[in-house]
Image: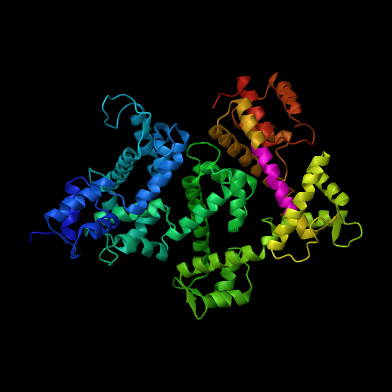
Amino acid sequence: SGGISVTELKPLLLELGFIPLHAMIAEALELVDKNHNADLDFEEFVVFLAVYRRAEGFTHPECLELRRIFDFFSREGDNPKELLPAECLSDALVQMFGLHVSEFTESLEEQLRNGNGLQRSGGGKTDSLTFGEFLIFARKTREEALSKLRSEHGGEDNEFTKGDENGDGVINETELRAYLRKKGYTPLQQNLDEVYSEVDRDANSLLDFNEFFDFMLIFQQREGFLKAVVEEMRLLFDRFDSEGSGEISAVELAELFRQLGYRLSWDELHIYVAQVDENNSGKLDFREYLRLMRLFREEELENMSNIFDEHSVNDLLPRKKVSQALHAVEQDVPKALVTELVGDLENLDFDKFVGLVDDCRQDRVRRERKKAGFTDERIAELQELFERFDKDKGGEIDTLELLGILKVFGWEPKTREEQQVLMKKLDTARARAREAGIKDTGADGSATIEFWTFVQLSRMLETEHQHLEEERMQALMQKLSFSQKEVEGFREIFLAKKKEWSEEQVVDGKPPPVAPGLPQDAVKRLIKALGVAIIGEKKPQLDNELRKLGCVGEGYLDFFGFLELMRWLMESNWLPSP
């Protein structure tokens, strides 16, 4: 015909070594196809290739995001926004494409630092990259993802073949859902539809190989979330990244989770962080945080799916069972709200049930903001303590009584300056209580404190305490020469033993109060489980060491003491180094 159609363009681009992604083709065509007939003559094709090559096959929005990432990581070098240090290459590429490319990007970075992977006059090792060179490595990363999906040797190892169960050369929605489940995703309809709209040019929900690659690239980049949800997560992440370092600590993550309506214990939080902390920094960058949210979401969806299956009939949840199902997923909401959200629907499919649970959580977050993220059990404990010090039972305490409560937690101010700081915190707590809908908070600067103001103050002080605990942990890690990865390995052992011991203390179905650590007998059993025989001279030596750590009689060994004990066992040659 003397022209190349879009259908003919894709295989031609592949032959020339380009990845024919739908968004970039559409953007380039918009620039070069003068008569907008989706058919290129030779001159238009040459210009098309120039546009495609100049941006290394990335769209304008993708280039802007790559530029933002380049500028951020180039701060570590001598020429911010001009040169990216070679040692930042892998982290920068992971921020663009997601954690699933980390293995390859680490290899690219190693090649670069050894003088390979980039042709420059003079040769030798490369210490930094320009933005144009960074784009080349971004293209290589995407090409590697394509290569992995294509699995050059074909056969059973071919990812497309794995997805195309009926062998018709395309992947339909049923096959796509099955493939995503194998990859650990729960495919929700609106999430699929959004990516379909970006890659499925024919709008028939049938994906050829190139469309399948395009789909998986976008889906994995977003960790299976909607684009708008990822953008909201970015804004929330940046808000809690108070220092602008590109990372958030466990304490900041705890605050972020409370903002989302999730309640996690301090120990649970550390376990989640350890699962996604790829660089073992003890903190999370945005991609690690996004992966964490996906893992958390998948656990949540699995629980919802089990409850939905239990209450549904023929894959539909009857209206009369909605409240019961919501109660099972710990979403107790007013019946009026459920009626409003369900509307005229007689039955709900799984996707609608998930949407309903999410809406109910947001309502619960609004209603329970006054609890500052504390559980009902913790609120009851604070209420009991508050009432104990509220001598006249007037529903408020004075500053002297407050100091008595703070002493119970070990939070009492020691100096006059600390007391003045506390008074300022009280006004902040009052402001937060008002934001949570509490009307009776007292006047700023007053000498009395109401209960819900006390709750907000308790959250502020507990967060400060957690910050101090994190600083203490960093200092201890340095003192004991343990890496973050080693510490998280020890934490897993410690928490597993603590859980086992707590279960042993259950009497008549009633769990014991939360212990600050492990008692001496549980510590000794743990050491024996690690393969250490506590016999002969070892017995008094261990008893002496535990005494130094305060684990004697009714004393407990907390995690800090456990780390010190582990180092002592290694230095005594009772245990090998990790």
Q: Nearer the viewer, residue 366 or 27?
A: 27
Question: Does residue 227 belong to the magenta stretch?
Answer: no
Q: Is residue 559 above or below residue 505?
A: above
| Quadrant in which the C terminus appears | top right
**Color theme of the render:** rainbow
Question: Which one is in front, 507 or 259?
Answer: 259
Q: Position of residue 191 (x, y in %)?
A: 41, 62
Q: Residue 562 vs residue 193: left or right?
A: right
How many numbered markers are drawn? 0
Q: Quadrant of the N terminus?
A: bottom left
Q: Position of residue 3 (x, y in %)?
A: 11, 59
Q: Main secondary structure of the magenta part?
A: helix
Quadrant assignment, res 540? top right
Residue 240 in the image: above or below residue 487: below
Q: Left of 99 or right of it: where is 392? A: right
Q: Residue furthest bottom?
A: 344
Q: Which residues are magenta?
A: 456-470
Residue lying at the far right of the rendered structure: 392
Name the residue: 51% across, 36% down. Answer: 280
Q: Position of residue 295 (x, y in %)?
A: 49, 51
Q: Where residue 274 sits in the image (x, y, percent)?
A: 54, 41
**Viewer can see residue 15:** yes
Residue 458 included in the magenta stretch of the image: yes
In the image: residue 18, left or right of residue 217: left
With 489 as the anchor, is 516 left or right in this view? right
Relative vertical location of residue 403 with respect to residue 336 in this rendering, above or below: above
User: Is residue 247 or residue 308 the one in the foreground?
Assistant: 247
Q: Residue at x 45, y 42 (%)?
A: 72
Q: Nearer the viewer, residue 492 or 461?
A: 461
Residue 528 visible within the image: no
